């Protein structure tokens, strides 16, 4: 079933820019598998399906949940499990700091796996890929990172790509909830800090 879902979603993600393409899903899937090795009580099937489907109806690309609902309804699993997958997906997004609480171990694993792909070297690459796709500035020395914001403010304002590090990415290390997620986030976080320090030197502060 997992392989069938992979094939179904591949063409959906291929329509997105490089920050949220199928390679992103493959990396998050790998992250989830690493975390699952240290969380033996988790329902691995729920985690893997939620990972594969978590961005098919991403608000950055669509206002409709139709794709997600269609794919979940087609699954040959119990209604309880389908709802569990929906809950995991809903609890992934950061939403400008207005995230939903991760209410299950499976949701925590999916969220940590996704957030690991938002930081480190790949996080840097994805940030500038998304910024380029949206026509955003690389950086803006006059721009101040927002401390608090609504989900709408977070999604609507075209901030410079570097500002995104201070509004979200540098905060993610301390928001990890699984033991393995926290461990993996440490080095990736430091890599971003080093990158930003080097960038400041190169652009004159």
Image (tube, rainbow, N blue to C red):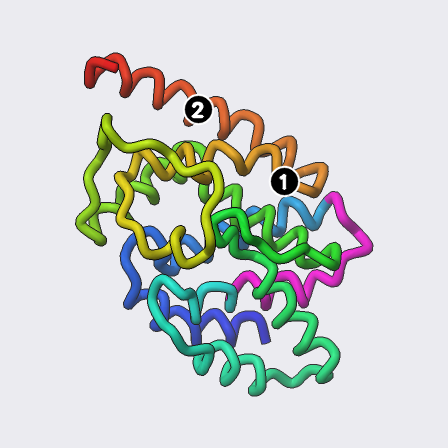
Q: Which mark is residue 106?
A: none
Residue 96 is situated, as x and y percent measured from the top left of the image, at 47, 49
Residue 20 falls within the magenta-colored stretch: no
Q: Which residue shows up at 43% across the image and 69% down it?
A: 56
> Where does residue 58 sit, x and y in percent of width and height?
42, 65
Label 2 secondary element: helix
Q: Nearer the viewer, residue 99 or 189?
A: 99
**Residue 139 position in % (x across, y down):** 23, 32
Picture quadrant where residue 141 is located: top left
Q: Is 109 rendered above or below residue 68?
A: above
Magenta range is 38-52
Circles 2 and 1: CB atoms closer than 8 Å: no
Judge whether 174 appears above or below 99 on screen: above
Label 2, label 1: how far apart the Cα atoms are: 17 Å
Q: Residue at x 20, y 18 (%)?
A: 203
Relative to the observer, which residue lies in front, 26 or 141?
A: 141
**Where's the C terminus, which quadrant?**
top left
Q: Which residue position holds label 2? A: 191
Tell me if residue 158 comes above or below residue 76 in the rendering.
Answer: above
For the residue carrying disc 2, how many other residues have a C-alpha within 10 Å: few (<14), some (14-19), or many (20+)?
some
Residue 176, disc? 1
Q: Classify the position of the N terminus by image quarter.
A: bottom right
Residue located 65% across and 61% down the image: 47
Query: Local crowd at mark 1 within 10 Å, few (<14), some, or many (≥20)?
Result: many
101 is higher (above) or lower (below) than 146:
below
Which quadrant of the structure image shows residue 199?
Answer: top left
Q: Earlier in the sequence, mark 2 or mark 1?
A: 1
Point out the frontmost of discs 2 and 1: 1
**Percent x, y of residue 14:** 31, 65
Residue 54 horizontal side relative to residue 139, left or right: right
- Of the pair 145 and 42, the residue shown nearer to us: 145
Residue drawn at (67%, 67%) of the image: 46
């Amino acid at each position: 079933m997992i392989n069938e879902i992979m094939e179904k979603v591949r063409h959906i993600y291929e329509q997105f820019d490089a920050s949220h393409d199928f390679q992103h899903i493959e990396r998050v899937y790998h992250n989830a598998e690493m975390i699952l090795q240290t969380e033996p009580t988790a329902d691995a099937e729920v985690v893997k399906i939620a990972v594969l489907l978590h961005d098919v109806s991403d608000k950055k690309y669509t206002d409709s949940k139709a794709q997600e609902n269609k794919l979940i309804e087609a699954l040959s699993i119990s209604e309880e499990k389908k709802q569990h997958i929906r809950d995991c997906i809903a609890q992934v997004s950061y939403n400008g700091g207005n995230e939903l609480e991760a209410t299950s171990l499976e949701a925590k694993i999916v969220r940590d796996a996704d957030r690991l792909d938002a930081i480190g070297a790949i996080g840097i690459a994805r940030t500038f890929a998304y910024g380029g796709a949206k026509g955003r500035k690389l950086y803006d020395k006059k721009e101040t990172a927002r401390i608090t914001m609504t989900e709408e403010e977070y999604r609507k304002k075209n901030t410079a790509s570097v500002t995104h590090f201070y509004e979200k990415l540098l905060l993610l290390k301390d928001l990890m909830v699984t033991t393995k997620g926290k461990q993996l986030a440490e080095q990736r976080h430091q890599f971003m800090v080093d990158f930003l320090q080097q960038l400041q030197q190169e652009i004159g502060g």
